[in-house]
Image: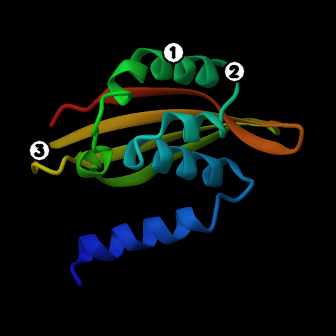
Amino acid sequence: MTARALIFSAVLLSAACGHSNSPEGVAGEFLFRYFIELNQRGALELSSGLAEDKLREEIELTQSVRMTPNLDLASSKPFLDYELVTSQKRSENAVTLVYDITIENPGGAETKREVVLTTMKQDGSWKVSNYDTFLKKS
């Protein structure tokens, strides 16, 4: 088994176990659902505030495409490698996490992005309250 296959298997296994109720846990699960599963509705379950608004808008904008007969999203799923670059505690209930992400599409094209996630603890559960994605220059 290649290193890439092992990493992908580890990501799938950790996602299958669910996220931990922590800023890092909810952020990792959000990244998995949003970037690997291409599942905005799944990411929405982990969101609140501005992140929830952004996802609802994306879902509305992509609804007609997702309704396309015989749409095969499984063949479009990218390989994702991400690394937590920094985590900054804003308060007891707010943490900002910055990730470097490498996205390799099935055709082999690679894109590097920086993702900034803000997490907030609400009613005892951590949620992604905002996210921004920036294209990284090579």
* x then y, percent, for residue 41: 55, 35
Q: What residue type is labelled 1?
A: Glu
The residue under label 3 is which amino acid type?
Ala
Is 78 on the left or on the right of 91, as rendered? left
Tell me the element at label 3. Answer: loop
Look at 32% across and 53% down and name the residue there: 80
Q: Is disc 1 placed on a helix, strand or loop?
A: helix
Mark 2 element type: helix
Residue labelled with disc 2: 49
- Quarter of the image containing the N terminus? bottom left
Q: Where is residue 52 in the image (x, y as percent from the top left)?
A: 63, 24
Q: Where is residue 75 in the image (x, y as percent from the top left)?
A: 23, 50
Which of the pair 54/138 is nearer the observer? Answer: 54
* Residue 119 located left or right of residue 42: right
In space, the residues marked 3 and 2 are separated at their CA atoms by 33 Å
Q: Residue furthest front?
A: 69
Q: Which residue is drawn at 38% across and 52% down?
A: 82
Around disc 3, counting alpha carbons within 10 Å, would you say few (fewer than 14), some (14 to 19), or many (20 or more)? Answer: few
Residue depicted at 11% across the width and 44% down the height: 109
Q: Is residue 79 left or right of residue 44?
A: left
Q: Label 2 amino acid?
A: Gly
Tag 1 residue:
57
- Using the image, determine if residue 43 lies above or below residue 18: above
| Circle 3 residue | 109
